[in-house]
Image (cartoon, rainbow, N blue to C red):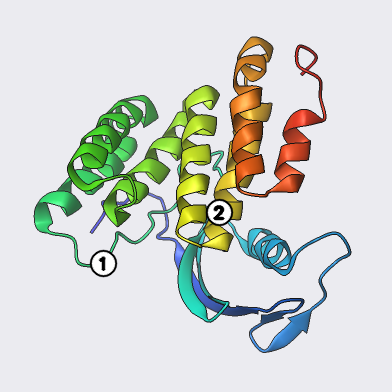
């Protein structure tokens, strides 16, 4: 169990079911319209984001292309420390303890200490288990969130792009879009000189994934004017 900060209520958890088709989205049995210029996946994500609250963990069961997955929201970049996401299932105690250490540092040592730990953990786990292992990806999401919280938007954008490309390789469209959204949001908060330096790499990554809306967002402002 993760220790709760005194006076902080435990986040509520509710469930919802989404079915994403070629041109339809169904939420808990009710169809929702897909706006012109948006894909069904983007429409489903917009619906989930609208329901996400800091005090709420929204467990979204998503069926897409015959492949079910479960998302735990909020998964948008936080302006405060988000509720704890469930750890990957079946972890050995040693790995679970290392992920829990990030949470404990966030609660008791502050986001800067937690960010340092999370960054080192991602490097260690990538070398030990590989970049696509569930525990590595979980730690990388922690690192990206903490980089945002500590104002390290350059690291946040780079990490969210890596996560987006990894999820895209895994054919996980919902998480690909979520991570890509967060990468663009992080880039927009960078210092102008940093944004210029990272713009091309981010835009090229979005183009490789076929995310035209994200690519357009990164290239709409000429370099040196963002």
**Nearer to us in this view, 206 or 139:** 206
> What residue lies at 29% left-to-right and 37% top-to-bottom?
122
Q: Residue furthest right?
A: 36
Q: Give the quarter of the figure containing the N terminus.
A: bottom left
Among the two numbered marks 2 and 1 on one chain, the one whose residue lies closer to the N terminus: 1
On the image, the x and y values in percent for residue 157 come to 54, 32
**Residue 60 visible:** yes
Q: Nearer the viewer, mark 2 or mark 1?
A: 2
On the image, the x and y values in percent for residue 226 come to 76, 19
> What residue lies at 66% left-to-right and 41% top-to-bottom?
207
The disc placed on residue 89 is: 1
**Residue 6 visible:** no
Measure how far apart labels 2 and 1 are at the Cα level.
21 Å
The disc placed on residue 176 is: 2
Question: For mark 2, does the 10 Å Cα neighbourhood hold few (<14), some (14 to 19), or many (20 or more) residues?
Answer: many
Does 172 appear above or below 30?
A: above
- CB contact under 8 Å: marks 2 and 1: no
Query: Could you tell me which secondary element the residue under label 2 belongs to?
Result: helix
**Nearer to us in this view, 219 or 9:** 219
Question: For mark 1, does the 10 Å Cα neighbourhood hold few (<14), some (14 to 19), or many (20 or more) residues?
Answer: few
Q: Is residue 26 left or right of residue 160?
A: right
Does 10 appear above or below 107?
A: below
On the image, the x and y values in percent for residue 139 come to 32, 44
Using the rendered view, name the quadrant where residue 214 is placed: top right
Query: Could you tell me which secondary element the residue under label 1 belongs to?
Result: loop
Q: Is residue 144 left or right of residue 195?
A: left
């Amino acid at each position: 169990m993760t220790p709760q900060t005194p006076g902080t209520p435990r986040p509520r958890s509710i469930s919802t079911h989404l079915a994403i088709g070629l041109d339809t989205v169904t939420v808990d049995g009710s169809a929702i319209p897909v706006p012109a210029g948006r894909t069904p996946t983007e429409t489903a994500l917009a619906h989930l984001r609208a329901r996400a609250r800091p005090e709420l963990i929204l467990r979204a069961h998503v069926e897409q292309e015959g492949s079910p997955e479960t998302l735990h929201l909020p998964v948008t970049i936080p302006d405060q420390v988000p509720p704890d996401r469930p750890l990957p299932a079946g972890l050995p105690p040693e790995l679970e303890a290392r992920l829990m250490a990030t949470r404990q540092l966030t609660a008791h040592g502050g986001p800067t200490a937690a960010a340092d730990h999370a960054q080192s953990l991602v490097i260690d786990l990538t070398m030990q288990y590989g970049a696509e292992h569930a525990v590595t990806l979980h730690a990388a999401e922690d690192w990206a969130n903490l980089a945002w919280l500590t104002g390290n938007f350059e690291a946040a954008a780079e990490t969210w792009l890596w996560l987006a490309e990894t999820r895209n390789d895994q054919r996980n469209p919902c998480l690909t879009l979520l991570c890509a959204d967060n990468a663009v949001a992080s880039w927009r908060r960078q210092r102008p000189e940093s944004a210029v330096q990272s713009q091309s790499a981010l835009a090229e990554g979005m183009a490789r994934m076929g995310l035209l809306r994200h690519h357009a967002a990164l290239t709409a402002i000429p370099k040196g004017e963002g």
